[in-house]
Image (cartoon, rainbow, N blue to C red):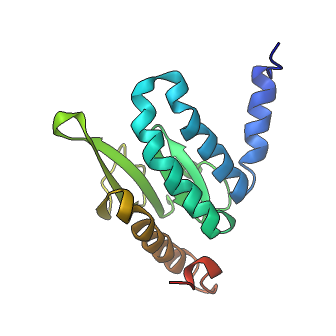
């Protein structure tokens, strides 16, 4: 018999995870990894994002950035707390998203914005594929750090090229 948590216990577990940057990455990776369990159409989403998220954690980005999600978007910020919509003005963030193109094939991109990309356009957007995803995301995160934490040194994950 499975030992399942009650809804309240699950909410409390997620809230604990979201209190730290590293916990926020753990939650996003759990969310992305579980998507195909709900609908097999999410398999390409998970297959694209999981290696990228793991590479980011392996590089140490989870110590310096908060990760979150808005539906199918994965969002990174230097905000102190979860839920970017609570901030006024809205903080700068980096988003990984996909759009459907002809033939129902996803078009992936990394974008920079001050708002949720479901309701606003990005300031900058770069298409990515599996091979380019990590270096492009790394550059966007470095730019995010420099703009939102100008008085702080660049974190070690950015010092190795």
The answer to whether 13 is drawn above or below residue 52 in the figure is: above
Picture coordinates of residue 51, whole percent (x, y): 51, 53
Quadrant position of residue 77: bottom right
How many marks overall?
0
Picture coordinates of residue 83, whole percent (x, y): 60, 48
Which of the pair 55/146 is nearer the observer?
55
Which residue is found at the position 33% from the left and 56% from the top? 109
Picture coordinates of residue 65, whole percent (x, y): 61, 64
Which residue is found at the position 62% from the left and 61% from the top? 57
Which of the pair 106/89 is nearer the observer?
106
Q: Viewed as shown, does residue 70 lie left or right of 119?
A: right
Q: Viewed as shown, does residue 81 lie left or right of 137?
A: right
Which residue is found at the position 43% from the left and 32% from the top? 42
Which of the pair 152/155 is nearer the observer?
155
Picture coordinates of residue 114, whole percent (x, y): 43, 60
Which residue is found at the position 53% from the left and 45% from the top? 69
Q: Quadrant of the N terminus?
A: top right
Q: Viewed as shown, does residue 36 lie left or right of 111?
A: right
Kindly tell me whether residue 52 is visible in this rendering: yes
Kindly tell me whether residue 61 is visible in this rendering: no
């Amino acid at each position: 018999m499975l030992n399942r948590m009650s809804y309240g216990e699950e909410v409390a577990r997620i809230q604990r995870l979201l209190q730290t940057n590293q916990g926020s990455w753990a939650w996003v990776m759990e969310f992305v990894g579980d998507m195909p369990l709900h609908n097999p159409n999410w398999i390409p989403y998970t297959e694209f994002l999981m290696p990228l998220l793991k590479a980011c954690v392996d590089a140490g980005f989870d110590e310096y950035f908060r990760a979150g999600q808005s539906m199918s978007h994965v969002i990174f910020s230097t905000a102190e707390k979860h839920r970017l919509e609570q901030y006024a003005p809205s903080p700068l963030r980096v988003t990984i998203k996909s759009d459907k193109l002809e033939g129902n094939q996803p078009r992936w991109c990394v974008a920079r914005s001050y708002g949720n990309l479901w309701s606003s356009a990005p300031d900058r957007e770069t298409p990515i594929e599996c091979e380019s995803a990590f270096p492009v995301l790394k550059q966007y995160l470095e730019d995010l750090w420099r703009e939102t934490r100008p008085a702080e040194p660049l974190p070690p994950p950015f010092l190795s090229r």
